[in-house]
Structure formats: C-alpha cells, structure tokens
Image: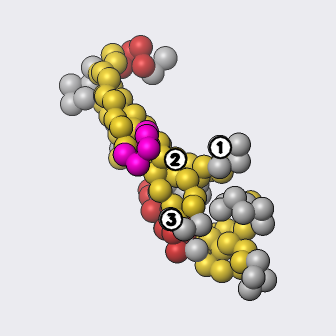
Amino acid sequence: MVADDFNFDGSTDIAIRNGNNSAYGGPSYDVYVYNISKRKFVLSDELTELATTKLGMFSVDKARKRLITFEKSGCCWHQTTHYAVSPGRGLYVVYSLVEATTSDGKNVEVTTSSLVGKKMKSKTKLYPVNSYYK
C-alpha cells in the first residue's frame, strides 16, 4: 500500500497494489482518494489508470503539485510525463519529455513539451548518444 496526498487536497489518499498489470509486468494499483464530504475513500478511475498503464506507481511532486509517470518501449524510447490535478478538470498533462534513440543508434532525439497557457508547446533537439548518456 502507498499512502500520500495524490490529488493535493490536504487529505491522505491510498493506493493498493492489485497485481503486476502495469507495463512490462510491473506493479499496478487501485488508487482511492479520500472524499471529505462522504468521509470515505473513493476509487479514482483516472489515478488508477495512471498506476496501471504506465511503469508502476506514479511519483508525487508535492512542491509543484504534480504526478509524474514513466513509460518506455524497449531500450530506446522513454517518456516522462507530468500531470496537474484540477478538481474541475481532472488530470491534464503539463510537461512531457520523450527520449528516442535514432534508428542508426548514433543520436538521441529529445522532445520536450510544456503547457503554455492552454496549448502544448514542443521543442525537439538531437544529441549524440555518447554525450547524452554520460
């Protein structure tokens, strides 16, 4: 079990491991948020999906009020995604980093996307593998 304030409302929420159903057979979780008015834990479909479809349980960045997930496809494609939590809007992506090794294995294409206003702005740069993965 993992206990933390996943939706940043000041109440402790819980995530209960439900098996190895996340990517690459990693741990998966049912995530329950504490509902103050009902005075009980309620299953969060959005947070459960994050803790099941990514690489295990998400990280909690309390300082920036973000949930962070990781994904990969083999050795050569990795993605880190930061989500904000909004009571009226639910989860939404505010930042993404994608690292993809080129087919020749010589470079890494790095794409960063950030939410600016209401639109995602992306930048892509190419780095030599040897200097990027020092």
Could you say where residue 104 lies in the image, as x and y percent from the top left? 21, 25
- Which residue corresponds to mark 3? 89
Could you say where residue 108 lies in the image, as x and y percent from the top left? 33, 25
Instruction: Say which residue appears at 73% left-offset and 74% top-offset.
Output: 34
Instruction: Say which residue appears at 46% left-offset and 51% top-offset.
Output: 93
Magenta span covers which residues? 114-119
In three-dimensional space, the C-alpha distance between marks 1 and 3, rounded to whole angstroms, equals 17 Å
Circle nearer the viewer, 2 or 1: 1
**Residue 19 in view (yes/no):** no
Numbered circle sitting on residue 82? 2
As shown in the figure, which amino acid type bears the numbered disc 2? His
Instruction: Say which residue appears at 25% left-offset and 29% top-offset.
Output: 102
Could you say where residue 42 lies in the image, as x and y percent from the top left? 66, 80
In three-dimensional space, the C-alpha distance between marks 3 and 2, rounded to whole angstroms, equals 15 Å
Q: Is residue 54 magenta?
A: no
Closer to us: 107 or 63:
63
- Which residue corresponds to mark 1? 64
Residue 108 placement, left or right of 71:
left
